[in-house]
Image (spheres, rainbow, N blue to C red):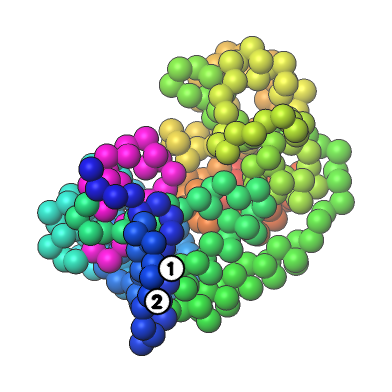
Amino acid sequence: MSRSYGDRLPVIPQGQPDPACLAEDIVLLHQPRQNLYLAASAAMDMFVSMDALDAIRFSALQADGWYIQPARAAMEEGKILYAGKYAAPDYERILEEGCGLAIENTMISHTPEVREQLEKLGIPVLVDYSSYESHPLGRTEWVKLYGVLLGKSREAEAAFEAEKQAFEAIGSAEPTGKTVAFFYITSGGEANVRRPSDYLPKMIAMAGGSYFLAPDGEDESKSSTMSMEMEAFYAAAKDCDYIIYNSTVDGELRTRQELLAKSPLLENFKAVQSGNVYCTTQNLYQSTMELGTLIADIHGMLLGEDQALNYLYRLE
């Protein structure tokens, strides 16, 4: 068994000497990191915002899996290579080109043998925990970490400040008194929802709405989502003024009939009967540097000003 690198990955500025007397589990990352294997798809937008796509050599998504056009174009041009899914990377291809770092999402915890093999081959692993952030700007701020890794802290700061200004331009909207549920229906027929502690319910609040689930002080889970049986979801969300279907998992919907096909119980929801049913675009999850725009979209939805939304649309 190889040693575990954990998450102790100090970054050494270019041209600086290595510190002495380091613990065995610490792996040094020298700036700038190149030939990255990106399995954490939510981080791609951060690299684009820093004009740093050239640091990524390998992707865990194929070209048609990217909704971020610069990433898709880079793969179609052969600048970024497909190197297998996060759970089954192409170790030979990664090794051939000297992968400098594997950036994984939290799903890597379900396949610890993959992390172990990467580390055994001398490839350090960094896990992107940005989805665990409780505030949307906290998630966006991860761009600063990647800026440090690439020696692009100035560009990362500029990208973050631009998004911060977008948040400040929206401000905290006046409460509208409207309640919102955000969910998708799993293959097992349950409703997968965001936990109240997640950043997305906070975005709904910033837009002037109220999330349909109240905060639970006893919930210590680090997961951003949870599944509810449909009966429990119905009891909690049936009177919501708006429902938003999360299309990033099983694809976009176009009509309310397509939604009702997933669960007949939804027909009795107040939002369905009043026509206040919206769906996210599939590129939402990958657009981590556009969260301010999403808040503006939710605000527009709540005000009935939905003619020019970017990441939401009303179901027919």
In the figure, 130 relative to 10: above or below?
A: above
The answer to whether residue 280 is left or right of residue 23 is right
Residue at 42% in and 72% down: 11
| CB within 8 Å, label 1 to label 2 | yes
Horizontal and vertical percent position of residue 280: 55, 42
Q: Say which residue label 2 marks.
A: 19
Amino acid type, residue under disc 2 in the picture: Pro
Mark 1 vs mark 2: which is more N-terminal? 1
| Circle on res. 10 | 1
| Circle on res. 209 | none
Q: Is 113 part of what is drawn in magenta?
A: yes
Magenta span? 99-119
The answer to whether residue 228 is left or right of residue 83 is right
Horizontal and vertical percent position of residue 50: 46, 74
In the figure, 242 relative to 280: above or below?
A: above
Horizontal and vertical percent position of residue 45: 46, 62
On the question of residue 3 being in view, the answer is yes
Horizontal and vertical percent position of residue 4: 33, 49
